[in-house]
Image (cartoon, rainbow, N blue to C red):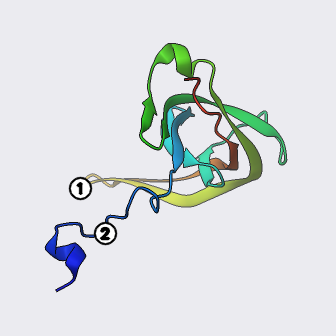
Amino acid sequence: MFPARAAGLRGCRSPSERETRVYAIVRSGGRQHKVAVGDIVEVDKISTAKVGDTVELSTLLVVDGDTVTSDPWVLAGIKVQAEVVDHHKGVKIDILRYKNKTGYRRRQGHRQQYTAIKVTEIPAAAK
């Protein structure tokens, strides 16, 4: 049996080996997304931004290792920077309505428009 399993430390690393990951919860288009630097995220279309532009996303939560920042006054000054990578459409959704024995059938389709953004910077919360 492995010594780490015997001690009940499955998968745990020492604090020096553990990497500190900074991530944030941001709001865009009425939805919330968990993002980290370098992530590419699909958000609802940002019509004012062109490919290559930089956009700012409002922050709801910032996690920096063991430090969690959720104070609205502090988060008001923190804006996540992201670069617009692409504008595209999502998959087609078929909407079918049918009522039995009445001859009522309606078919409709929808393709949501998205903007792909790449997170470039998450400012650290002021201590």
Residue at 83%, 48% in the rendered image: 51
Q: Say which element carries label 2.
A: loop
Q: Is residue 90 left or right of residue 62?
A: right
Helix, strand or loop at disc 1?
A: loop
Toward the viewer: 98 or 77?
A: 77
Q: Residue at x 54, y 35 (%)?
A: 26
In primary-sequence order, the first of circles 2 and 1 is 2
Asked where in the image residue 4 lies, by quadrant, the reply is bottom left
Q: Is residue 100 above or below residue 54?
A: below
| Quarter location, residue 70 | top left
Q: Residues within 10 Å of mark 2 (few under 14, many from 20)?
A: few
x, y percent for residue 37: 63, 49
Query: Which residue is labeled 2 in the image?
Result: 11
- Residue at image position (52%, 13%) is 73
- Look at the image and tell me in which quarter the N terminus lies: bottom left
Whether label 2 touches label 1, CB < 8 Å: no
Disc 2 marks which amino acid?
Gly
Q: Considering depth in this image, is 66 or 105 the residue closer to the camera?
A: 66
- Between residues 83 and 106, which one lies in front from this camera angle? 83
Q: Residue 67 placed where, x, y %?
A: 44, 35
The residue at which mark 1 appears reads as: 100
**Nearest the eye: 122 or 8:** 8
Q: Which three-letter amino acid code belongs to the residue tagged 1? A: Asn
Q: Is residue 96 above or below residue 82?
A: below
Q: Nearer the viewer, mark 2 or mark 1?
A: 2
| Left or right of 37 in this view: 27 | left
**Quarter of the picture holding the C terminus:** top right
| In the depicted structure, whether residue 15 falls above or below residue 26 | below
Q: Point out residue 24 in the picture as x, y percentages from the top left corner.
A: 52, 39
In the displayed structure image, the side of residue 44 where residue 64 appears, left or right:
left
